[in-house]
Amino acid sequence: MAAAAGLKTSGPNYEYETGPDGEKYAVAGDVNVSYQSSSDPEVNLRNAQQLRAAALAPADPSAQDRKVAAQAEREIAQARQEIMQEQNGTAEEDTNSNTTAETSETSPAFL
């Protein structure tokens, strides 16, 4: 459960088998993790990275664990793309404002 820190989780659910000594031993288990998208791609990136880490935390991840990790990878890629788009949009705005400033500075020379 430590790998899912920061994400909403349920308590662990264990499957038990009775050992040769008559005692019950946990042989499998799971933890439900809730992931909710945000409008902030930075938050989505962090959450998806945590989700991937939680899914791959078991020594032998199950098919469901690997499926969750693959979905988290898609979320990570999407968040990174959105972050890059935001950064490029900001860079374009900066470039446009610099171009405008340069144009206004050079305009009097053409008068």
Image (cartoon, rainbow, N blue to C red):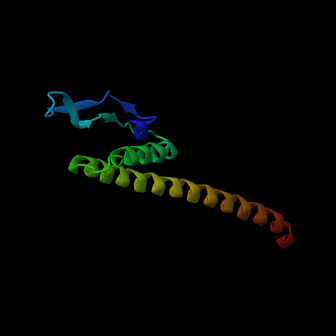
In the drawing, does residue 40 fall left or right of residue 37?
right
Quarter of the image where one finds residue 91: bottom right
Quarter of the image where one finds residue 108: bottom right
In the drawing, does residue 22 fall left or right of residue 53?
left
Q: Residue at x 13, y 34 (%)?
A: 20
Quick one: 46 or 36, which is closer to the camera?
46
Does residue 65 sit above or below 107 in this rendering?
Answer: above
In the drawing, does residue 84 fall left or right of residue 14?
right
Quarter of the image where one finds residue 88: bottom right
- Tally of numbered tags: 0
Kindly give the residue lying farthest to the front in the view shown: 21
Q: Residue at x 85, y 70 (%)?
A: 111
In the rendered image, residue 80, in percent from the top left (x then y), is placed at 47, 55
Does residue 53 sit above or below 33 in this rendering?
Answer: below
Quick one: 42 or 32, which is closer to the camera?
32
In the rendered image, residue 64, in percent from the top left (x then y), is placed at 23, 47
In the rendered image, residue 101, in percent from the top left (x then y), is placed at 77, 60
Q: Residue at x 52, y 46 (%)?
A: 42
In the drawing, does residue 85 fall left or right of residue 13?
right
Q: Residue at x 64, y 57 (%)?
A: 93
Does residue 46 sit above or below 97 in this rendering?
Answer: above
Quick one: 46 or 96, which is closer to the camera?
46
In the rendered image, residue 1, in percent from the top left (x then y), is placed at 38, 35
